[in-house]
Amino acid sequence: MTPETIVLLHGFTQTGRSWEPIVATLAQRYRSVRAPDLRGHGAAAARRPVSFAAIGADVLALAPDGEPFVLAGYSMGGRIALALALSPAARGRIARLVLIGASPGIADAPERAARRAADDALADEIERDGLAPFARRWAAQPLFASQPPEVAALAHAERLRNTPAGLAASLRGVGTGTMTPLWQRLPELTMPVALVAGEHDARFRELNARIAAAIPAATVHVVPGAGHAVGLEQPAALAALLSQGEAA
């Protein structure tokens, strides 16, 4: 049965609008294209709790009950998508999984604890200083250094659609430090899995190679001319990838 629905999960500080440049293309391939604001973000900024389980339930509710669907997630959205794909609640529901610049979590316990402390500190900082100062600091990360000015402007506008309380709740509830590492469970993924990273995103290109080695039906895709935010930097290329049966 060919999936007729694709659900797109955005990254931290984004909203569902971040997928707008590719939705029209995907609408030619899928009957239903869903790109929700995830809890803690955009129109769902005030929804609680912000947790992997709660967001996973929201995602499953977007697709017709019992029908398989394609699930794609970028960065934070990719981690949420991966956790959902490995959950009992989603058994038999996800026909294909696309992870864009996403991690299975931090396997090393001390490193994970340090990241959780850093995420908690950042959440406190956002609540204390407000959205605009945080948005400027977040954009200055090396992870986004390859973005041209017009892409950086789009990303900044996305960040400003959020709230300090929502982003803080997201960091505390579904941050990388909070996530239970899923490395050991990757072999359980039996659906086709596409692992996507930008050409200039060396960290996630290396990570995808390691992830692919553990998944029975994984393909690795490097998007030319893109950094970490593949969907914003090369939307046409990502739309083409998501529209391909074997990769989407």
Image: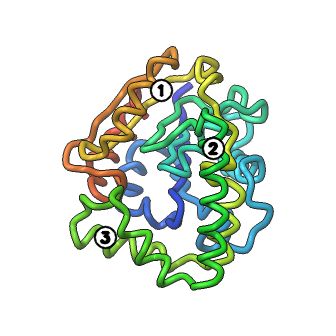
Tag 3 and tag 2, C-beta contact below 8 Å: no
Q: Answer with mark 2 or mark 1, whichever residue precedes in sequence.
A: 2
Tag 2 and tag 1, C-beta contact below 8 Å: no
Q: Answer with mark 3 or mark 2, whichever residue precedes in sequence.
A: 2
User: How far separated are the C-alphas under marks 1 and 3?
Assistant: 29 Å
Residue 47 image point, x, y percent: 75, 68
Which one is in front in this view, the residue at disc 2 or the one at disc 1?
A: 2
Residue linked to disc 1? 211
Q: How many marks?
A: 3
User: How far separated are the C-alphas under marks 2 and 1?
Assistant: 18 Å
* Residue type at the position of mark 3: Ala
Above or below residue 200? Residue 167 is: below
For image coordinates 52% across by 39% down, the residue present is: 103
Residue 192 image point, x, y percent: 49, 23
Residue 216 image point, x, y percent: 51, 14
Q: Nearer the viewer, residue 40 or 32?
A: 40
Above or below residue 125? Residue 119 is: above
Residue linked to disc 2? 112
Q: Disc 1 on helix, strand or loop? A: helix
Tag 1 and tag 3, C-beta contact below 8 Å: no
